[in-house]
């Protein structure tokens, strides 16, 4: 398949619809605000009637954790899709001189990695301040014992995440943005270790499951977002074929990612809620309720992904797959918010 630049008179038909940028920005801000309400208000809602107690400031902690997860997804997804884009026939050769031809890389939309790293740095810094105060929300700066972070496992992990996001941001602004993969990988490993302290039963198994789960989730969420952004840019340059080819490549990998996410998620849930109690705990505990909400959202996301895949393969215009894919991105954003909420809720008791 050879991709060529649209000829005069045809380019206008292929160009994406301009305008409405302010409307899309407002809609995005509204969606982000609504998603933020999930971790902020979620703890009190999930705990209602369970008799469980939650730490003070759980809503704020859940929000910071959700921001940290989202900050991981964006750059990892960009690196993933940019590599997939190199496999699209003609994506480099058909680009404008002085851009892709000069670098050997396909044209890509403006990177959001530096902004994501800044958001992740702020979130990690906020979480580190809580750890430095004895896992309590500090009332003033004097409450924070920054030096004490070096004395505990959680403190060292928190410091690692702060520094890793700082380095990732610097890498994103450098001439070799792909090097941010290493500090981002450090954050993923740190999160996997943090979620499973040494006092837990077989903590290394839990950390391994979380490592795979979080990595696949970041590739799925961030990858879909960047694939849609890239498709929109390519549509005006190359027409339909390039964007459809890129979405097809992403869809094939996403199917494997979904399988891995499902397997590790089920295994992790069974480790924390044994099979004989899981049905009761899904409705009787705050963690179980949040987990059930996440499962339902992932099921809806899977249905949207299947719809997009079918349109991509069978529809006369394969780019009609973008409609369910955009809804899928929104649903995945809610999944990230619920994931942040889960980290702030008390773990279920192994009855």
Image (cartoon, helix red, strand yellow):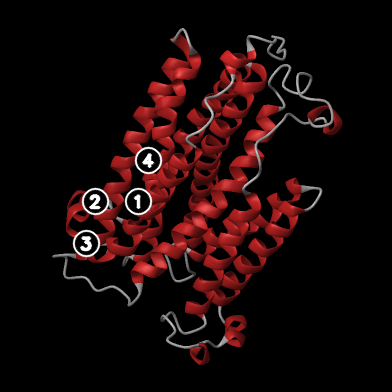
The residue where tag 2 is placed is: 278
CA–CA distance between discs 3 and 1? Answer: 21 Å
Mark earlier in primary sequence (3, 1): 3
| Disc 2: CA contacts within 10 A as few (<14), some (14-19) or many (>=20) | some
Q: Between residues 333 and 145, which one lies in front from this camera angle?
A: 333
Q: Secondary structure at mark 3?
A: helix
Question: Which residue is the extreme one toward the left?
Answer: 49
**Residue 124 occupies quadrant:** bottom right
CA–CA distance between discs 2 and 3? Answer: 20 Å
| Disc 1: CA contacts within 10 A as few (<14), some (14-19) or many (>=20) | some
CA–CA distance between discs 1 and 4? Answer: 21 Å
Vertical position of residue 284 compared to residue 55: above or below = above
In this rendering, position of residue 103 left or right of residue 15:
right
Q: Are marks 2 and 4 in contact (CB under 8 Å)?
A: no
Label annotation for residue 45: 3
Q: Residue at x 52, y 92 (%)?
A: 142
- Spot occupied by residue 173 in the image (x, y as percentages of width and height): 74, 53
Q: Are marks 1 and 2 in contact (CB under 8 Å)?
A: yes
The residue where tag 1 is placed is: 269
Q: Secondary structure at mark 4?
A: helix
Vertical position of residue 302 compared to residue 25: above or below = above
Mark earlier in primary sequence (1, 4): 1
């Amino acid at each position: 398949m050879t991709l060529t630049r649209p000829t005069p008179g045809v380019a206008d038909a292929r160009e994406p619809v301009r305008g409405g940028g302010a409307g899309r920005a407002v809609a995005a801000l509204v969606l982000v605000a609504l998603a933020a309400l999930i971790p902020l208000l979620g703890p009190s809602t999930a705990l209602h009637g369970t008799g469980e107690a939650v730490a003070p400031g759980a809503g704020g902690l859940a929000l910071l954790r959700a921001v940290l997860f989202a900050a991981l997804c964006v750059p990892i997804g960009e690196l993933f899709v940019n590599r997939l884009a190199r496999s699209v026939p003609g994506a480099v050769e058909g680009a404008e001189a002085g851009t892709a031809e000069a670098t050997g890389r396909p044209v890509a939309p403006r990177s959001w990695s530096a902004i994501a790293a800044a958001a992740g740095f702020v979130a990690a810094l906020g979480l580190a301040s809580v750890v430095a105060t004895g896992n309590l929300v500090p009332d003033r700066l004097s409450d924070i014992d920054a030096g004490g972070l070096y004395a505990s496992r959680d403190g060292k992990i928190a410091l690692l995440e702060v520094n890793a996001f700082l380095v990732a941001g610097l890498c994103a602004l450098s001439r070799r943005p792909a090097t941010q993969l290493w500090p981002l990988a450090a954050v993923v490993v740190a999160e996997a270790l943090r979620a499973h302290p040494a006092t837990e039963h077989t903590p290394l198994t839990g950390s391994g499951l979380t490592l795979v789960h979080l990595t696949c989730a970041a590739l799925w969420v961030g990858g879909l977002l960047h694939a849609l952004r890239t498709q929109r840019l390519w549509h005006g340059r190359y027409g339909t074929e390039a964007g459809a080819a890129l979405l097809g490549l992403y869809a094939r990998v996403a199917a494997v990612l979904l399988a891995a996410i499902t397997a590790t998620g089920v295994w992790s849930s069974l480790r924390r809620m044994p099979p004989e109690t899981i049905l009761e705990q899904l409705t009787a505990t705050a963690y179980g309720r949040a987990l059930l909400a996440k499962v339902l959202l992932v099921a809806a996301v899977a249905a949207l992904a299947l719809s997009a895949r079918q349109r991509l393969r069978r529809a006369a215009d394969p780019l009609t797959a973008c409609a369910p894919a955009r809804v899928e991105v929104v649903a995945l954003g809610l999944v990230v918010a619920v994931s942040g909420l889960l980290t702030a809720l008390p773990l279920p008791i192994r009855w």
